[in-house]
Image: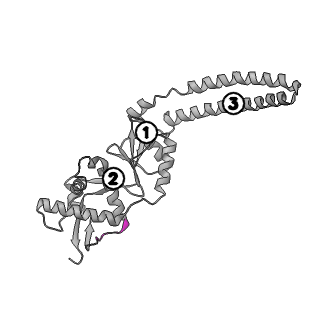
Amino acid sequence: MNELPDAGGAGLERALEALEAEALALLEVVSSMARVAKRAKAAAETGTVRDIPQALDGAAQLANAAAVAAERLKAAWRFDVEDWFASGEYKRELLASTAEAGVSAFELDDRILCYPVIVQVSPSDTSVIIDKKKDRRIRPSVVVARLGQLQQREPKFKPEAFIEALSYAYDLVIASKSMRWGAPVKLVEVHSVLTIMPGAAREYTKPEFARDIYLLDQSGVVTTRRGRRMSLPASALTRSGGVLRTVTRGGQAKDYAGICFEEVGE
């Protein structure tokens, strides 16, 4: 894992805070201008001519103040967002923000694993992708708040359908390697079967597959409709490579390596 920067240092969050403050200052001046303009309008409507000079002077003063505030607002935004994304600093800032907020997340294979979702940072269009849904609201505190909300929800996952798909993919791996039925096979090989169609591996990545294996593991569903019992052996297969890593509900790393199906009672 990468070393995280000081969350209180300079970054996109601080730049947006400064811009927000200047925008608020301009809004306050504009609101004051609106009140003065309403007084001038009311004086004109009723003919209260003694109130008109004061309203006009106030409007002119506030117009100058608004011009100054607008220039300050413009000057407040000099942050190079594209460079921040391209350099990887945005991802580092986002990880630091999750840690500061107590949201469990870590980086793996250019993705951020944050149970139960997987986050990708897209430098090409300065956006974040949360479980394949693009979001241009990239302020770190906003993204982290969203991730925190998602961690409080139960994931939309159907373990019964998933275990059936795994069972069929397992059979194909066993057959292709002429292995003994019931022997453990690598999960990465099962993933290869599930994503055999062109482009499918990009649509259903190994981190997503590992996340779903963990969700299945936690669901308690271990038996298929055909009466086969699934297990997820790890020891020997973990040492042979092809390990899949995900993050648990509690924020710890969790590794998976193998899978096997056996008839119940064997």
Q: Which residue is mark 2?
A: 208
Q: Decide: marks 2, 1 in contact (CB < 8 A)?
A: no
- State the residue at coordinates (64%, 25%): 69
Q: Is residue 57 left or right of residue 127?
A: right
**On-image quarter of the N terminus:** top left
Crowd band around label 1 with a 10 angstrom C-alpha radius: few (<14), some (14–19), many (20+): some
Who comes first in sequence, dot 3 or dot 2? 3
Q: Reading the chain from its start, which is encountered first: label 2 or label 1?
A: 1
Q: Secondary structure at mark 3?
A: helix
The answer to whether 254 appears left or right of 38 in the picture is left
Residue in the picture at 32% in, 64% down? 161
Secondary structure under tag 1 reads: strand
Residue type at the position of mark 1: Ser
* Of the pair 233 and 131, the residue shown nearer to us: 131
The spot of residue 176 in percent (x, y) is 13, 59
- Under circle 2, the secondary element is helix
Q: Quadrant of residue 109?
A: top left
Q: Which mark is residue 16?
A: none
Please name the residue that numbered disc 1 is placed on: 127
Determine which residue is flagged by label 3. Answer: 30
Q: Position of residue 115 (x, y in %)?
A: 41, 54
Residue 77 against residue 117 in the figure, above or below: above
Main SS of the magenta part reads loop
The answer to whether residue 200 is magenta is no
Between the C-alphas of marks 2 and 1, the distance is: 20 Å
State the extent of the magenta-drawn residues as a range.
219-224
State the quadrant of the C terminus.
Answer: bottom left
